[in-house]
Image (cartoon, helix red, strand yellow):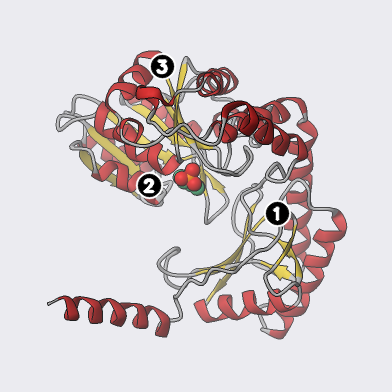
Amino acid sequence: MTKSFYSSINKEVKSIKSDGLFKEERLISSPQGTKVTLNDGSEVLNFCANDYLGLASNQDVIMAAKNSLDEDGYGMASVRFICGTNNAHTRLEKELSEFLGYEDCILYVACFDANGGIFEPLFGPEDAIISDSLNHASIIDGIRLCKAKRFRYEHSDMVSLEEKLNEAKNSRYRVIVTDGVFSMDGTYAKLPEIVELAERYEALIMVDDCHATGFVGNSGKGSAEHFGLEGKIDFLTGTLGKALGGASGGFICAKKGVVELLKQKSRPYLFSNALSPSIVKATLKALELVREQPERRRRIFKNTIYFRKQMKSLGFNILGDEHPITPVMLGDANVAQRMSKELLNNGIYAVGFSFPVVPKGMARIRLQINSEHTVEELDKAIKIFKKVGTNLKVI
Ligand SMILES: *Cc1c(COP(=O)(O)O)cnc(C)c1O
């Protein structure tokens, strides 16, 4: 019996490999940054990190973490409600809620857990969760853990959303759930229309702003601020593992009563160890830099606009809104894989994505522009894209 189990596992791995879909980890032997050193000693320009504001290797952020190790030790060795709450945890919850414009905030060890822990305590069988079809895997899993009725609307299709709102008319509560920014496409959710529909159909709204918190919107408050819709989103989830320093951690911002209830009932919060204080204090520093260094946000969008324009003028098919996530559409999975390999041979680290991460026939190289990319680095990448793209007959 166990023998057939293991042989079936090995068979599945083999078939993933023969389909060309096996994901390898590439080893990096330097800190995260616009340039990274690979294990073979080569230095490459990095266009894959979620480190939008370059804070992952920022000296002030690192120092905050180091100081915390001296002041607070290495770990809490407890869940929050037993003896795992350092005063830094509550400070970060307070500062995140103030920054993002909410009454309260609850931290998790990852946004995956925040999304996994938000639905089940708040919604039951009488309720309806109406979710965008391209929402992040953690949202899909979180919804699965909850007994509410599930409705899936076509990606960013407001006609489809309205249909689902109608179908869910008799539910006690309705909640519309969407990523603020779709990470494979670099597009924003249609929040103005979603807010309008939510008001008309008396629905709540949950937004996952992992690819927005800290750098999208005039002061970095995310996709609601981008559209001038602050205060309209009931539940906001986000990560500390992207623009806010890049270590790990997640959060939910909401009204006070909601956070109070989540702290009583949300399972990833109740049954998982607290975030290390060093991460919490480094995130507090990252948040301070977000507030005090708006030039990082200006640089990232200046870089984004420049890069997208140059790439389009070379003839590349670039998807998305003016967000630092810049997908170069290729279609064929093999082309994406070969292109990624060729780019790396030429010193550009940019990963290809194909099915099942994106729909079949819509393979792409997804680039992420960083506030710390210099114009020289962007120009070098553009030049190499031109060369590799020409060789592969993509342009
Ligand atoms: C990255 C991401 C997550 C997961 O965040 P972690 O903090 O890394 O667990 C959740 N949702 C979206 C939309 C993301 O992009």
| Residue drawn at point x = 58 percent, y = 31 percent | 227
* Pointer 3 local density, CA inside 10 Å: few below 14, some 14–19, many at least 20: some
Q: Pointer 3 and pointer 2: residues touching (CB < 8 Å)?
A: no
Q: Is the residue marked 2 within 8 Å of ligand 1, measured from its CB?
A: yes
Secondary structure of residue under mark 2: helix
Report the residue marked by disc 2.
138
| Residue drawn at point x = 16 percent, y = 75 percent | 2
Secondary structure of residue under mark 3: loop
In the rendered structure, which amino acid carries the disc numbered 2? Answer: Ser
What x and y, as percent, mark residue 74? 55, 36
Alpha-carbon distance for marks 3 and 2?
Answer: 22 Å
Report the residue marked by disc 1.
31
**Residue lying furthest right:** 376
In the rendered structure, which amino acid carries the disc numbered 1? Answer: Pro
What x and y, as percent, mark residue 309? 76, 57
Q: Does any portion of residue 199 appear in the rendered image?
A: no
Reading the chain from its start, which is encountered first: label 1 or label 2?
Answer: 1
* Pointer 1 local density, CA inside 10 Å: few below 14, some 14–19, many at least 20: few
Quadrant in the picture for residue 345:
bottom right
Q: Is residue 386 shown above or below 78?
A: below
Alpha-carbon distance for marks 1 and 2?
Answer: 27 Å
Residue 255: assigned label: 3
